Image (cartoon, rainbow, N blue to C red):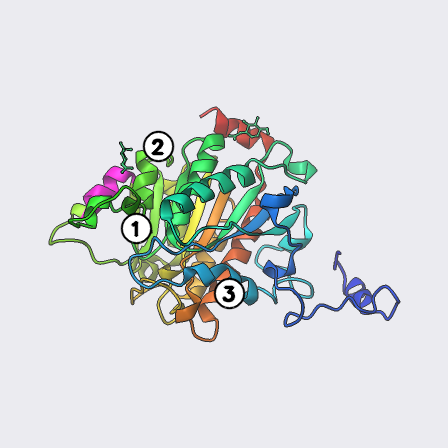
Amino acid sequence: MRFSTLASLAALFEFTTAGRWTEDWPFAGFPSFAKLPFHTCLVDNPEFDIALIGVPFDTAVSFRPGARFGPQAIRRASQRQNGLRGFNARAGINPYDNWAHIIDCGDIPVTPMDNQLALEQMNAAYDELVNGTTTSGNTAGALPRLVSLGGDHSVILPALRALHKHYGPISVIHLDSHLDTWSPDSYPSYWHSNTSEFTHGSMLWLAAQEGLINKGHCVHGGLRTRLSGDDWSDYEEDDRVGFHRIHADEMMEIGPRGIAERIKQIVPKNVPVYLSVDIDVLDPSAAPGTGTVEPGGWLTRELISLIRQLQDLPLVGADVVEVSPPFDHADVTAMAAAQVAYEIITNMVKTPLELETRKFFSNM
Ligand SMILES: *[C@@H]1O[C@H](CO)[C@@H](O)[C@H](O)[C@H]1NC(C)=O
Ligand SMILES: *[C@@H]1O[C@H](CO)[C@@H](O)[C@H](O)[C@H]1NC(C)=O
């Protein structure tokens, strides 16, 4: 339904027979993300241009768990985004009422009992979802795009594996207080299994080993983690993995515009980009509901402003992860995550992946 004028908005509330029961208040009804059409996509295979997919997985965390409850909390926090008030004034569009067919794909059913099996499930699910069919004519040839709602951060690995099959190596913009390029050796233990190498701190290291990322053209934003030992070896390893580093403090020095400019110097034009937002990039005062809290982070307004300035990058996928509702207060973290997802979706609508762009990608 288009609300292009106030008159058509008013028409929604006319007391016609058809309109009699169409009011859908944010606090009522079924809480799909932004009250978008809901499908269990892995069962029904619907066509879509952009979809939200929940990944309720949190058994690869090193500290506080609870992110398995993230997707449901983010959906609940998104209820005021659609219907009456979906127009994004900074972008000049309502992303939910534009060319793209946007849906909520439900959750990937992931076992909490066995991480090796869970990874297998996530690999298979992303393979199917990424290789679906788009709805919209003006993106013919493009693949459907997913915004994942975590879940812990390890869910980026199966997402990148699926995307890499179509696009080749991907430039990752990783907004997080932590590196997440830690080699499995940085969790020293007498005990070891292959599965124990797959964690929410090592998955970008694993992604680089598998050649999934565009080395030298990936960037961390918002870093403030403490490092191992008493030297720079974690950063040296991060260099080898292929990331540039932008620290949390730089937000005070150069602001969101300066950070966006630095990111655009690192990420070349017209390469496939994946935007990953660990909600712990925000200061705990703005996002207490997360697993591995690091004081001294960005404000929600700074993060949103930064994402807005990245709107012309060709995003092939994105995620908002590490929202742990048991540690949240007044839904503040879930609401920040829901707003971040809305801004990412707006960017995807503003910058469609066109046939020519994808050809360019697959020729790389
Ligand atoms: C995507 O699906 C098509 C047709 O269903 C298939 O031929 C192709 O191999 C799939 N690609 C990948 C990377 O799975
Ligand atoms: C662990 O992974 C290595 C290399 O992929 C493999 O050779 C080995 O069999 C695996 N071990 C177990 C216990 O799965």
Q: Is residue 158 above or below residue 246?
A: above
Amino acid carrying mark 1 in the image: Gly
Residue 58, horizontal then vertical, whole percent: 39, 56
Residue 183, horizontal then vertical, whole percent: 24, 44
Q: Earlier in the sequence, mark 3 or mark 2?
A: 3
Residue 242, horizontal then vertical, whole percent: 29, 39
Gap in Å between the C-alphas at discs 1 and 2? 18 Å
Per the rendering, the mark at residue 201 is 1
Quadrant of res 264: top left
**Residue 262 seen in render:** no
Residue, x 49% and y 27% (percent of image)? Answer: 362
- Residue 227 left/right relative to 132: left
- Asked if residue 175 lies in the magenta stretch, the reply is no
Q: Main SS of the magenta segment?
A: helix
Quadrant of res 46: top right
Amino acid carrying mark 2 in the image: Gly
Quadrant of res 328: bottom left
Residue assigned mark 2:
211
Residue, x 27% and y 39% (percent of image)? Answer: 241
Q: Which residues are magenta?
A: 234-242
Tags 1 and 2 touching, CB below 8 Å = no
Secondary element under disc 1, as helix, strand or loop, is loop
Gap in Å between the C-alphas at discs 3 and 2? 34 Å
Q: Quadrant of the N terminus?
A: bottom right
**Residue 321 seen in render:** yes
Residue assigned mark 3:
73
Amino acid carrying mark 3 in the image: Ala
Secondary element under disc 3, as helix, strand or loop, is helix
Query: Ligand 2 is located in which of the four quadrants?
Result: top left
